[in-house]
Amino acid sequence: MLSCVRTVALCAVMLAFGACSDNTDPASETDTWFRDVTRESGARFEHENGMRDELWFAEMMGGGLASVDIDNDGDQDLVFAQGQALDGPDEQGVLHAVLRNDLAAGVLRFTDITADAGLLATGYAMGLAAGDVNNDGRVDLYVTAFGPDALYMNLGDGRFERTPAGPNDARWSVSAAFTDIDRDGRLDLYVGNYVDYRLANHKPCRSTTSARDYCSPTVYPPQGDALWRNVRGDPPVWEDVSAKSGIGKPAGGALGVIAADLDGDGHTDVYVANDGTPNLLWRNDGQGHFEDVAALSGAAVNMGGAPEASMGLDAADHDDDGDVDLFMTHLDRESNTLYLNDGSGFFDDRSATTGLASSSLPFTGFGTRWADFDGDGDLDLFSANGAVTQVQARIDAGDAFPLGQRNQLFEQRDGVYVDASAAAGVDTGLDVSRGMALTDLNNDGGLDIVVGNNRGVGQVLLNARPPARWIGLDVRQREGGRVAIGADVRLMTDGGQRVRRVHRDGSYASSSDPRVVFAAVPERVRIVVRWPDGHKRTYTDLALNRYHTLSP
Amino acid sequence: MRVALFLAVLLFGACAEPPAFVRHPDTTRLEPAVRDAIGEARSDFERAIDANARDAGAYAALGHVYLAHHLNDAAADCLDRAAELATAESAAERDARYLSGVAHAASGRQRLAERSFERVLAIDAGHNYARYRLGNVYLKAGRLQDARTMLHTAARALSNDPAVLSSAGRLALAEGDFQRAGDYFQRALRLQPDATRLFHPLARAARGVGQPAEPWLARAGDGEARERDPRLRDIAALSRSTQMLLEQGQTLIAAKAYDRAADVFTRATEQRPEDVFAWASLGRSLELSGELDRAGRALERAVAIDAASSVAQRFLGMYRERRGDDVGARRAYQAAANADPEDVRARLLLGHAHMRAADWAGAAVEYQVVSERRAGNITARYYLALSHLAAGQCERASEAIESGLALKANFGPLLEAKARHAAVCGAPASELAAAMQMALALEAARPDAASAVTVALVRAARGEHDEARRARERALERARDDAMRGRIVTQLPADGAPAVSAWPVDSPTLRPPRLTAEASSDRLN
């Protein structure tokens, strides 16, 4: 009451001087890096988590999405994984939402084509992985779920059809990655499985305050992951090679999955972010077998030897030294962690010295991506946040789903990350953010962010400050063919090089725009593309401020 | 405008004294005992504040109760206010600032924590736990030089606290001083050998000085270096949360402080008389502290509350085993496994009980299940190999040994099992020679009865009867009790002739020393 009185008094003083207003200063709004265009663009999606005040573990984990060009019209469409009731699925079925991007003259406009797209859920969906599994130039979708997963083939006219022959892991999976493990030209699939939780084995748990709360994943046994090899044909024939490849043993509850050549030997490795147990680095020996070398390579646990509750992750060359570094989001009171690659596949936890430790302690991070959000040439970081145990302040505020936290954006300045969330305009809400996709929705070179909020509205953050000089690259396996997942692209500069990977995976339960954007580029650029088969090509005559489609 | 200014001045005048703002956390979702404790603390607080609105002690007391129940935001409010109201630079201000720093740090508010700890050190330069915590804040902020000033001094002053040494080690790692990092981590491990997480940074430090990391990683586990801050222990004792008491009791058991664990579990049973886990944990802590009669009664109560509790049945089995009641123990373990087929600890213990009853096949079934449920569990594979060896199932034993070694190639017990396998499974001379080398190396590294038995087994298989006899004698000398001696005598022929099986003489499958001759399972059932 007293504080209220004081506010009135303060306002009275300010009114007297003509400075008190309910309206936000419009200038400050346009100054932010991002603008929330969810409503104005028609990108309306509300996630349903099916909660019933039973604190079911699965209900607070979903919220993944994908940024994909489903109709090959040159702009990125959005697909959101929808949840449903956990204790008795809707008999009518639940459709995952598809929002078609009808970009025209630079104006972003989405049309909801959910009803026609046909993405009928088979389980309680967690997220999406995207990839063209039959090399027909159309991106297909894999939906991870609490319950059976499903692979949907893109029919090319905005509709999808579930293929019963596809990978259909019935275990609880969250993130998955399409990648060509055996370099046979077809995308294989790694599925990260979480824990053996069922409503039948639901356990009552309490938080440190003694309040009834969601359980820790360690309460339930971990599940082994799955690796599906895309053997041949259209539709593809899949072989479950989990056991024989060595990745099948249950070694932790997987939440984040990313495929990248982490040791520079030319074979795609897989890094798995586990929740509360040591992370895995599956080194691909190129002969179809994987060995976990995370502990030996220093990427299993943090600097203190503690396994962390890893949720989302990304892999990128954060310091432009030519190798792939790793970043993971974690539980509050744990810091987010940056593992720096020394070039030979050995990693060091550099979270503290890069400014990423303290700033993330109050938050639980999920979806994340490295990207040059401010167009200055180096990589920044976004973290979609939302707690997994109830936040006392949200309980006190009467929130029925008290897990909301603000999102964060970290700007890189000379190798150190500074929390620039307010300047970027990404910290406006207290949502339970989970999935996050990186994309360029209006093809202006400014990298946009789409956030999937559990039991909330998906958020589209349009980059309001696109770079003045940029170049965008859509790298394909062949002309008109699928995206060359696993390729890397180097922008050669006077001072060195900037390396970016062509990938959709990483983040949390989400799939991103695979196109590569370099900002703050010189007038004449020299680009070197290396395709997954080792083929290289150099480009020196690419025009600036537009996307180019490159094929060998 | 004049009216507005007048109003403002008037109202600001009323607010000149800052209101005693304390957050009121919503306690409706908390355990009843916690709600009551907080309710009582708040009533005491309000009475004290009614009498004296500037009562620093009242704010501090309420802050302590909030902190004990992890309501950190509210705790920080109270403790900050207590510090403001306390006499400047007094012990009261110091203590309130210190705990407010702890609360802020627990909520991730590093800057506020930093300010609190800096103030503590300004008041009391000898407050080394504040120095340690401030060092951690600086370390997380990447301020390595400031962290060094704090943590090196703290590590000297608190040289018996593994968590403090571990922080100093992490700082050294961040600075790239790998030699120093290794020294700190090794000192921490000497103080707390079960802090097995520290083997990971030790491996990193080893790599940094050009040494192999693998030997350290082979010993890595998930044991955390624990703080020994007496102030926080006092605060934790204020907790009325049964959940917290149960967790606190588990921590005390891990620290082998069984008497204190029993006290804590007793409080838990008082707060929640129908909680089977509280009674079972009380029984377990009493059994470990040697109070067997009380342990029996507590466990009896636990299984009476819920006979289908796998934890209660498992603890009951352990209690019976301790009393020498192998049959009753086996029955309880079976009940635990039936109640929760996923309870791998119960299934391991059931496997051990089968082994003691010479039911090798039954043991193998349980160990196999555990190996499948916990694919990364190397000890389950070791036991599986032992059960197959004991049954003379050489091929299956070999499979289990090799699958275990695939998980961890330098796991000592499995290497020992491999040597024994060679000895009793008719291995060719070349394999026996390798087994001999391994057995001798293992005995040199750990000169106990089991390693001597391994040497005796391999010697005998190689026809080296005199050396086998001498190894047998060493084993008998080192045997820790008559039961073990009996097994050695049974297993190893006195004349140094080859043995027919490789029964494990010194493994966890052996029952712990019997504390009483009374077997009380009938009474408990």
Image (cartoon, coloured by chain):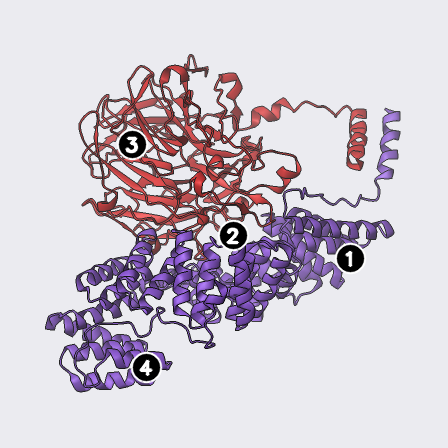
Chain colours: A red, B purple
Please name the residue that numbered disc 3 is placed on: A527
Position in image of residue B86 (x %, y %):
78, 57
Residue A535: give x, y in percent of width and height. 19, 35
Which chain's residue wears label 4? B
Say which mark, if any, is on residue B142: 2
Residue type at tag 2:
Gly
Q: Nearer the viewer, residue A235 or B420?
A: B420
Q: Which mark is residue B57?
A: 1
> Given this view, does label 2 or label 3 mark the residue nearer the observer?
2
Helix, strand or loop at mark 1: helix
Q: Amino acid at mark 1?
A: Gly
Residues at marks 1 and 3 on the same chain: no
Q: Give the label on residue A298, or none.
A: none
Q: Residues within 10 Å of mark 1 (few under 14, many from 20)?
A: many
Cα distance in 3D space between marks 1 and 3: 68 Å
In the rendered image, which residue does mark 4 sit on? B485
